[in-house]
Image (spheres, rainbow, N blue to C red):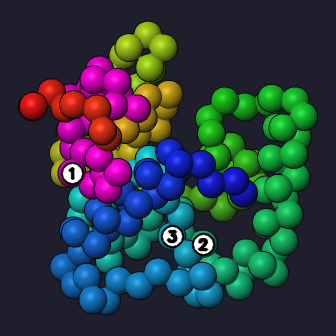
Amino acid sequence: MTLDANYLRGTMAAVLSILQHTSCPESVTFHFLVRRVIYLDSDIVVVDDIRHLCTGVMVMDVEMWRSGGYTKMVEDWMGVQKQKRIYHLGSLPPFLLVLAGNIKAVDHRWNQHGLGGDNIEGKCRSLHPGPISLLHWSGKGKPWLRLDSRKPCAVDYLWAPYDLYKSSSPSLEE
């Protein structure tokens, strides 16, 4: 896996959002060796206590994952994608192909997805109705890019407080 600056920037904002919104930040730990892993994309901000996430965006039992050989299967699909583009939805399709029927839907509040809209046509999406626990900028438009270019969507301002990078370009408020 290659880490580029935008991936790292998004990941740090996601981590900061988790720490700021948990009711007990002292009990939030990030490990590489655990029984269960919660997978979050780098374009996500958590605005609620993550302990209420039981079924999360993706929760994996590490022992079951390893014994089932899922990493190799996901990597195989990613290899197919690299040779011949077969899907257009980022990191999700390989997981869907491998896990097939072993997936359960999550409540909309835990995946307010599509906030990235369509950056090519400049379309912005609004929040789903109801309570919000997780904001997901899936889609072409990433909040840090739109804020830096001074062409943000209204929901991009919800991401800005978690941006540890803080662009050197002048903001709209200055």
Judged from this view, the residue extending furthest toward the top is 121
Does residue 22 lie above or below 5 as drawn?
below
User: Can residue 100 be seen by looking at this rendering?
Assistant: no
Q: Which mark is residue 161?
A: 1
The residue at 78%/78% (across/down) is 66
Q: Amino acid at mark 3?
A: Ile
Q: How busy is the neighbourhood of tag 2: few (under 14 within 10 Å), some, or many (20 plus)?
A: some
Whichever of labels 2 and 1 marks the residue nearer the N terminus, that label is 2
- Per the image, is 150 magenta? yes
Whichever of labels 3 and 2 marks the residue nearer the N terminus, that label is 3
Q: Which quadrant holds residue 55?
A: bottom left
Quadrant (top left, top right, bottom left, bottom right) of the C terminus: top left
Q: Which residue is mark 3?
A: 38
Name the element at disc 1: helix
The residue at 53%/48% (across/down) is 5
- Per the image, is 88 magenta? no
Is 70 displayed left or right of 50 in the figure?
A: right
What segment carries the magenta color? 145-166
Q: Amino acid at mark 1?
A: Pro
Q: Amino acid at mark 2?
A: Met
Q: Picture coordinates of residue 29 (x, y %)?
A: 41, 85
| Separation (CA) of disc 3 from disc 1 | 23 Å
